[in-house]
Amino acid sequence: MYDREESEYFRAKMKAARRICSGDPKPSDLPSNREIRDQIQTFARLHEGERRDENLLQMRIEALRMMRMLRAFRPRLIGSTLTGHVRRGSDIDLHVFSDSVEAVSTALEAEGVAHEVERKRVRKQGVQQLFTHIHARGHFPFELTIYPANKAHHVFKSSVTGKAIERASIAELEQLLAREYPGVPLEQAVLEAENKVDRFQIYEMLLLPLEYVKENPKHHAEGDVLYHSLQVFDLARDERPYDEEFLLAALLHDVGKGIDPPEHTAAALEALEGFITPRTAWLIEHHMEAHALRDRTLGARARRRLEASDDFDELVLLSECDEQGRAISVEAPELDEALDYLRELAATCGE
């Protein structure tokens, strides 16, 4: 459950129990949801250290910012961001009350918040219910559960404790932040979060147009630049799954083709300035030279200059992925999947 291979307590318990004993265990033999949650938190504290506390503060500030944005729908913060039981990859859970999902979606669109609506049928205690969620992307992922307006004062029960869910209004969250973080200037922190640019949205903005940029079929039989870029990313992920800087270079190396195709490397570096690290920039800057190196057309002086870099091996690997990522009709991840993977990787590294 910590790695989110399983999200349901009961399913995770049964799966674990079947691994260590024969037959189906009795429910009374299994640990409670609360016990599992406590062990997950112990694991998170052990592996995430101080980064977890900093993430919790930032998540609560982001929650307050979103709640103020949706003030008209009487939002309530619930879940791990409120209770403090966050771990790597946790999202921010809000209850939002409106008879119109479209009204909430429109409010998010007006603020430039990327999101998608999900309707899910769930069977609880023998009764099938339809839940509507809005998944919003930002510095942290949000899950907004939409309830009818007349449910604003309804008492919801926790699947973990069986008791009333802890929840906080805007005013209550402000009080919690003032109480637990007395040294943090709250309004300044919210303003800084609001003005902070989400670099992943910049990446998405630069990558999306590549679907309509067609490659030269002589060198790229696969078709458009976006499909090629996603193939290269997937190959790079197989080789270096935890190297975010390398994976970003693989995904973004051709974004300049949507801006200035003849000078696509320079265009990419200009567009990405301030949103990538010097190492990622170096890999993108020299990826065409790496092709010349593979073709044995690169001069000796240029070769020695590249070989002097600590990232030379990754540059060669990027070139290999770039060359192989030109297949026809092969599976490649969707853009959202690639960006979500990188977001998760960044969160793991403490961004």
Image (spheres, grey):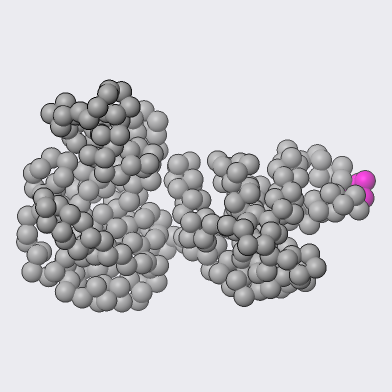
Image quadrant for the N terminus? top left
Asked if residue 174 shows in the view, the reply is no
Query: Which residue is at the far front?
Result: 23
Query: Which residue is at the far top?
Result: 21
Residue at figure coordinates x 20%, y 60% from the top left = 95
Instruction: Name the residue nearer the viewer: 327 or 191.
Output: 327
Residue at figure coordinates x 73%, y 66% from the top left = 221
Residue at figure coordinates x 69%, y 59% from the top left = 327
Q: Position of residue 257 (x, y in %)?
A: 69, 69
Task: Relative to 317, say whether 250 is above or below.
Answer: below
Q: How many marks?
A: 0
Task: Relative to 324, say whether 210 is above or below.
Answer: below
Q: Position of residue 53 (x, y in %)?
A: 33, 39
Task: Relative to 6, say whether 222 is above or below.
Answer: below
Part of the protein shown in magenta: 298-302
Report which quarter residue 33 is drawn in. Answer: top left
Q: Main secondary structure of the magenta part?
A: helix
Q: Position of residue 280 (x, y in %)?
A: 65, 50
Instruction: Name the residue nearer the viewer: 349 or 214.
Output: 214
Asked if residue 228 shows in the view, the reply is yes
- Left-right relation of 124 to 132: left
- Left-right relation of 233 to 155: right
Report which quarter residue 110 is drawn in. Answer: bottom left
- Left-right relation of 129 to 142: left
- Left-right relation of 285 to 80: right
Q: Position of residue 97 (x, y in %)?
A: 16, 67
Residue at figure coordinates x 37%, y 41% from the top left = 5
